[in-house]
Image (cartoon, rainbow, N blue to C red):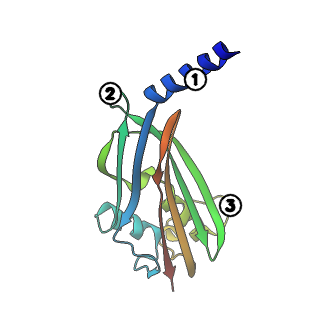
Amino acid sequence: MKNLILFFAVIFYSYSLTAQTLDGRIRVEGLASGKVLEESVPVDLFKSFKENKYKIQFSYKAGQVGKRGIVLFEMKTTLIKDGKTIHQSTRKNWPWLPGDMYVPIEAFDLIPALQNEVYEMPVPRLDWPKLESNLPKGSYTVRLEMVPVGEIRGSISPAEFSFRIE
């Protein structure tokens, strides 16, 4: 019995030496929570991200005995309107290297989720006049998460911000 306990202790200890660990955060620059958003049309918000008015900043450190490497992440988007979750999605297996970087808005499903709010129907149609429509009035909260895939210890602090459309 002692040999079995010793065996599992050695396996667990060796796993902890080789398992990759990480620590980091994601945040959105330029969007203070509670702000009245100037862009009430999703395509205008997309343009503001592309022109660097708003930036998604991602930073993480990874440690593993003997090497550094790519970590795969699930990119999770949650959109809440007036206290009710109206969209949740996950994009799987996005590779990122450790360090500081900016993440394009396309990595998350925020713009498509907001555009679906404009359509006010389950399946959007591609009729151009609706692409220019304003978001419905209300309070929105956005949560962007990057969750490491696989046997990686640690976590990335998510970004959360809110805005109003009046």
Residue that label 3 marks:
122
Q: Residue at x 62, y 61 (%)?
A: 87
Determine whether the residue tagged by mark 3 lies in a helix, strand or loop: loop
The percent position of residue 61, horizontal first and vertical second, equals 34, 44
Among numbered discs 2 and 3, the one appearing first in the sequence: 2
Q: Is residue 102 above or below residue 141?
A: above
Q: Residue at x 30, y 69 (%)?
A: 53
Q: CA distance from mark 1 to mark 3?
A: 53 Å
**Front residue of 141 and 124:** 141
Q: Amino acid at mark 3?
A: Pro
Q: Nearer the viewer, mark 2 or mark 3?
A: 2
The outermost residue toward the front is 2
The percent position of residue 154, horizontal first and vertical second, equals 48, 44
Q: Residue at x 57, y 70 (%)?
A: 118
Among numbered discs 1 and 2, the one appearing first in the sequence: 1
Q: Amino acid at mark 1?
A: Ala
Q: How many marks?
A: 3
Determine if residue 71 is in view.
Answer: yes
Q: Marks 1 and 3: CB-CB under 8 Å?
A: no
Q: CA distance from mark 1 to mark 2?
A: 24 Å
Residue that label 1 marks:
9
Residue 128's tag is none
The percent position of residue 37, horizontal first and vertical second, equals 43, 79
Among numbered discs 1 and 3, the one appearing first in the sequence: 1
Specify few, some or many for label 2: CA neighbours under 10 Å numbering under 14, 14-19, or 20 or more. few
Q: Amino acid at mark 2?
A: Lys
In the image: residue 64, left or right of residue 73: left
Q: CA distance from mark 2 to mark 3?
A: 46 Å
Residue that label 2 marks:
67
